[in-house]
Amino acid sequence: MKPFEYDRLENSHDLSAVANGRYLGGGTNLIDLMKHQIETPDVLVDVTRAGMDTIEQRDGAVLVGSQVSNTDLAAHPLIRKHYSVLSTALLSGATQQLRNKATTGGNFLQRTRCQYFYDTKRACNKRQPGSGCDAMNGLNRFHAILGESENCIAVHPSDMAVAMAALDAVVLTRKPDGSERRIPAADLHRLPGDRPDLDHVLEQGELIVGVELPEKPPKLQAYRKVRDRSSYAFAVVSAAVALDVEDGQMRNVRIGLGGVAHKPWRASKAEAALEGKAPDTALFMQAMREEMADATGHGHNDFKITLAPRVVVSMLKQLTGLGEN
């Protein structure tokens, strides 16, 4: 591991830009990357004591501090009652020990688990821009089928971020100059394009200080994760689905997909096809076919193109009372 300086942030309003520095929360991903020398910051700024570790209701919305642990967020009564899709996603994401350390802000910013990204002897445009992408013609079973580019087919690993995107959560940030931003969770991360090394839209020194959950989320919610083993593996495909059914029609339909793209994927085409319609299995499948129209497999991951719609259709049937089969 490259030597680094350590500093501690005592107040989230007192930020200072660091030329090659990183904020440190739980460190469950960042420290591993530093050990592999994939991340080599000159300075680590510890933000765990900067007063961003509370969950509170404010003007109807729920504000979650960026340093709230995944364990505390998943177990909080407000989250379990009104945002169960988020609680379920967090509980499916990691072991208890990791959830105790991992933070809300850090969960958003964890980097891909692509094996070529972690193997410094292999070509990876995300790790070393311009070097190529060995995943394209390699073992790409876990890789992207939506929104990918010729430069990168890695997927974002977070379960929590998929649920946040489906809930229309808003990420609250603060820059070193004191200015603040409200970024929709679905817009926080980037598609790879020609800069796959840029995971998100945050600027240097910009700190996630919290997340705002909507006042009135849809009442029907579920998160489902398809993985190779039941004990804390990353998603092959995952889905967060939330909606209301009013007078026999689906309203506020929200679908987030994980394991299929460089960012948590909001299935906007499927949502539009379902909004205002009566629940119907054939309609569910047609909506997801429209969503997957531009999906592209790369050999080993072709199966995701049919798996993702089946997962969502099954969840919609369950939530709307049409049954699971």
Image (tube, rainbow, N blue to C red):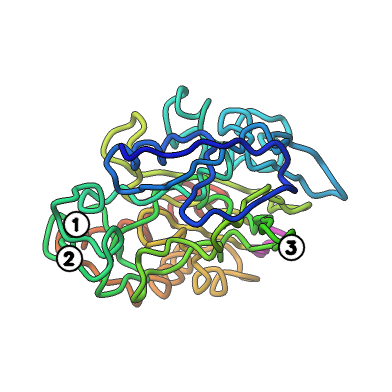
Which residues are the magenta region?
245-252
Q: Are marks 2 and 1 in contact (CB under 8 Å)?
A: yes
Query: Three-letter amino acid code at disc 3?
Result: Ser
Q: Are marks 3 and 2 in contact (CB under 8 Å)?
A: no
Nearest the eye: 77 or 131: 131
Nearest the eye: 68 or 19: 19
Could you tell me if residue 306 is visible in this image? no
Gap in angstroms between the C-alphas marked 1 and 3? 41 Å
Q: Disc 3 marks which residue?
A: 179
Label 1 crowd (10 A; few <14 / some 14-19 / many >=20): many
Q: How far across and how far down the image is residue 3, in percent? A: 36, 37
Q: Residue at x 26, y 71 (%)?
A: 151
Label 3 crowd (10 A; few <14 / some 14-19 / many >=20): few
* Circle 3: element type: loop
Q: Residue at x 66, y 65 (%)?
A: 249
The image quarter in which residue 251 lies: bottom right
Nearest-to-viewer mark from 3 and 2? 3
The image quarter in which residue 87 lies: top right
Label 2 crowd (10 A; few <14 / some 14-19 / many >=20): some
Asked if residue 247 is among those painted magenta in the image, a careful observer would answer yes
Query: Three-letter amino acid code at disc 2?
Result: Met
Q: Disc 1 marks which residue?
A: 140
